[in-house]
Amino acid sequence: MDLLRHLRLFVTVADELHFSRAAERLGMAQPPLSQAIRRLEGELGAELFDRSQRGVRLSAAGAALLEETHELLAREERLRTLARRAADGGLGTLRAGVPPDTTAAVLSALLSACAEHAPELSVDLQEVTTAEQLRLLASGGLDVGLVHHPVDATELRLGPDVPLDLGVVLPRTSPLARLPEVSLGDLAGHDLVLFPRAHAPDWHDRVLDVCRAEGFVPGRLRHASNPEFLLALVTAGHGVAFAQGPAARKEPRVAWSPLAGRPLTLRIGGAWPAGRGAHPAARRFAELAAEVLARHHAAASRREGAAHPPDDTPRPWSVVYG
């Protein structure tokens, strides 16, 4: 017996106190309705209505049951709503990876966008390199990540990505710092400070391949895992680095110049596991992240455009790491 269905029939009859009107309201014939109420009474072991020639009215048992039935049906509806929201990604916890160099402004805007879209979804942000994000996505340790492309997408779904052109960070005293833009070939003979390959192997290799193709073979490759250390190495004359404008300009002892032809474009986008087990909020998180990154990129470009030449293109993220 479908108890909830029979309870809904009971509530309708209790509202109308007339079997014919209740049947009409329910879109069914009166005999099946009367039979359903009899089955419910038999199941509960009590008559719910007093039936007489003068009409139908609730019995003592029916009156006692009616309030509880209203609460039970309301709880059932809340349960159904809860299940739908959870299935749509509006509830629970979303474990999301972001690159370690994500700025506070981007993080704040991303969390605000998530809260506006799904107020009851808890977003657990974790600072994780691209390589570690891919491992965690494969093992189930993350639901979604923001990764530096290129990546192997065989077992992943990819969201929209945002392109970020990189410039070169030079010691302030370098003759190249006076040029409006620098070509990769101009850097021949310099050492290069780069993020460790383990952070984002594919992007690391892409950077070096582009450098070689453009005539820049670093004399020595040095690694830095955080922006401050990278800038310190450049300041000390231990090499040049590739970065986005705003972060480099915070250090007065270095200069940032755009690269001629924009040969190094970092692409950042969302990735989540393929298959039916994917978190329902993963795709929307990736879309929101792309919107936030694009918006901050555009805002930074407008701010910097008034103070720097047109080729001096700033970016919303700090020095680039895996």
Image: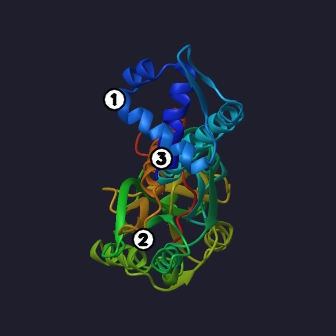
Classify 28 as above or below 214.
Answer: above
Structural crowding at the residue carrying mark 2, measured as other residues with C-alpha within 10 Å and reported as few (<14), some (14–19) or many (≥20):
many
Q: Amino acid at mark 3?
A: Leu
Q: Earlier in the sequence, mark 3 or mark 1?
A: 1
Furthest toward the front, the residue is 53
Labelled pair 3, 2 in contact (Cβ < 8 Å): no
Structural crowding at the residue carrying mark 3, measured as other residues with C-alpha within 10 Å and reported as few (<14), some (14–19) or many (≥20):
many
269 left or right of 44? left
204 left or right of 124? left
Residue at numbered disc 3: 288
Q: Amino acid at mark 1?
A: Met
- Residues 177 and 58: in front is 58
- Residues 100 and 156: in front is 156
Gap in angstroms between the C-alphas marked 3 and 2 = 37 Å
Labelled pair 3, 1 in contact (Cβ < 8 Å): no
Gap in angstroms between the C-alphas marked 3 and 1 = 48 Å
Identify the residue shown where x is 55% and y is 30%. Answer: 11
Q: Which color scheme did the rendering employ for the protein?
A: rainbow
Residue at numbered disc 1: 28
Observer-side mark, 3 or 1, equals 1
Q: Earlier in the sequence, mark 3 or mark 2?
A: 2
Q: Earlier in the sequence, mark 1 or mark 2?
A: 1
Q: Kindly state the secondary structure of the residue where label 3 is placed.
A: helix
Labelled pair 1, 2 in contact (Cβ < 8 Å): no
Can residue 81 be seen here? The reply is: no
Residue at numbered disc 2: 187
Q: Quadrant of residue 278?
A: bottom left
Furthest toward the left, the residue is 213
